[in-house]
Image (cartoon, grey):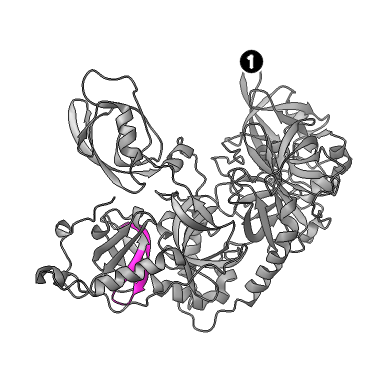
Amino acid sequence: MKNALFARLMWMLLHVPGFAFAAGEPDFEPFLKLQDNVQSLLPKVRPAVVAIFTGDGTASGVIMSEDGLILTAAHVAERPGRELRVILEDGTVVQATTLGLDKTTDAALMQLNDTERKWPHVKVSRQVIKAQPGEWCFALGHPGGFDEKRGVVLRVGRIVKQTANSLQTDCVLMGGDSGGPLFDLNGDVIGIHSLIWEGRDENMHVSMAPFLRSWDEMKGSHVIHTWGIGSGGYLGIGTEMNAKGALEVVEVIAGSPSEKAGIKTGDVILSLNGEAITDLPQFTHAVRVRPAGEEVQLRLKNVSAERDVKITLGIRPKEEG
Amino acid sequence: MITPLPSPKVLILLLTTVSQLALGELRAPLKPEEMTNGNQTLAPLAALQAQVARNTALLMNAKNKAVATLTWVGKEGYFITKASEVPRLEECTVKWGTAPKAQVREIRRDTRHDIVLGQAIHLPEVPAVSFISSKNLSFGQWIVSPAAGKVLKIGVISAKRREIKGFGAAMGIRMDDKPSSASGVRIIGVAEDSPAAAAGLIAGDLMMELAGEKIRDFRRVNELIFKRQPGEEIEIKYQRNDKLGSLKVRLASRTKVLSNWDGEDFANGGISIRTDNFAEVLQHDLPLNPLDMGGPVLDLKGRAVGINIARVDRITTFALPGELFWPMIQQWIEADRHPPKAQPASVATQKTATATPPTPAAAAKPAVP
């Protein structure tokens, strides 16, 4: 069970001459500046971070407007019109209702039911492109569930990678963080915690792009199955988790690579290039990290049988999104 | 229960280049050395790294596997570490830099704080650490700790300091609750990655004796285990296919065993055997492993403010604040340096740093309350 990243680090340390016993005073000025920056923002942003009871577990979210709009993850909200319990930092429980969601990017909106109250809130960063690899950021959330004695949990780290709809950071996340905010050093929200891979540096967040792109649809409680322009590989299908917990095709776009390959609504997606598909964000991610032109193999299941289909990923048509 | 973020078991190498159709000016993804705990990021802290490497060493078990990190606390080789990771401390050896492997003498254990004081024998003078109070640490403050005995890791105080209640010990078995006519209690399930599994118990085994007591009823087994602490070893005599066997199970925190029954912990490298029942902890987000427990937590000025005491899950490590254990440890060292005069000479020679290593058999374990 050796951590691959850790092993790599160890190896590198052995290959950096003079690293182990370098002399001189440590230069922690940049670290202290960063610390002051984060610590000065925490009291301002913490009250806007909430825990969300989803019925069978807890997740996180962040209030982004005075009248109580909450950003969270689509796999937390699941569908529009659900009334869920939300816990504020001081343990107060209030009610909120899910609005629209973009299941392909894992972005979702909720509305606190009491719109008269002036809610503590944070700003959404509209400079998506600024969340570049190497920038420092910090994550807040309720990993493992709401715990009043512990309070909200902080992680400070760096952006590792930016894609069309997501950010990867080394702020380590875990279950219960879903839907919680990632902040830049201005205290603006730049990401919403979405999923993790095994590595400690493999923490994925929805970037603000899907939110900004689909803001009106999401506020209007729409469920979005199509993707915006500028993503990676394109299949041209809309999918969602069915009642059996499998990923089902609900829409095949005319003229898309999927239609040419004979994918039909009602097909269940079992695997992509042999990797078992367990949920939508994971499937979306697996498609998006591959460039247009790459051939992938999907294993599908319909009422009668399982079959393998080879599809060459296309480029997203401009008019979609 | 918690809602896990989906964590696919199968990993894709995320090295595929994404075709950036609309994003021309995007910087390349970070290389490992550029990440928060990459050596390029931490290069300015090289002096701190060197200090941490000198102040700590690895404890290797009888099979020469690193099991815990120690922090030097007295120049004659006195050290402290997390007690529950080293139930047989005197079978361990100390690996410190280029010094030859040193034998270990156990001096005293404190089950409440899960700390043990020991001494490495025949080492040259070691650079001891003095702990200060952690009271000035604030939420979001940078701290550093050693990983794997030498690599510096950085992170922040990530939550409120607090007490962590204990929920007793467990070994991770399901038992047949039907009273058997004969003696013994049958195991019908063993949790993945649990103390029982690690010790070699399997479903179907009939437990005959626990800690020297004959057992007939599963409730008695629960009682016997529940009153013990995580980290303690308990001897089990059992029957498998008409053959009798005996083994020792090292109990873990009940919370750890229950939350990880099917082996689904996200801890990247496992979690400590004891993760609860601490009077007060500092919580931080350093990416450490169970074998890093026992190492010091330092502020950026290099002052030791606590000792890492439990790797809890993927994002959580607990540290004991210095003010909680340091006065006690100092008293113990003082008492060991100046043993009571009325002792037989043979014992007294064993109490000095230059004495021959004691044979493990002769070293009496302190009774644990």
- Residue B96 in view in this figure: no
Q: Which residues are magenta?
A: B65-80
Toward which corner of the image does residue B73 lie, by quadrant? bottom left
On whether residue B301 falls in the magenta region, the answer is: no
- In-image side of B17 versus B194 (left or right): right
Locate residue A146: give its quadrant: top right
Please rate how many residues cluster around mark 1, counting C-alpha atoms within 10 Å: few if below 14, some from 14 to 19, many from 20: few
On screen, residue B48 versus residue A229, left or right, reads left
Where residue B244 sits in the image (x, y, percent)? 18, 31
Rendered location of residue B217, percent (x, y): 28, 26
Residue drawn at x 68%, y 49% is A90
Q: Where in the figure is residue B186, as x and y percent of width and height?
A: 29, 26
Q: Could you say which quadrant of the image residue B93 lies in? A: bottom left
Relative to A15, B127 lies left or right: left
Task: Give the residue at mark 1.
Answer: A304
Q: Is residue B67 a member of the stretch shown in magenta?
A: yes
**Label 1: element kind:** loop
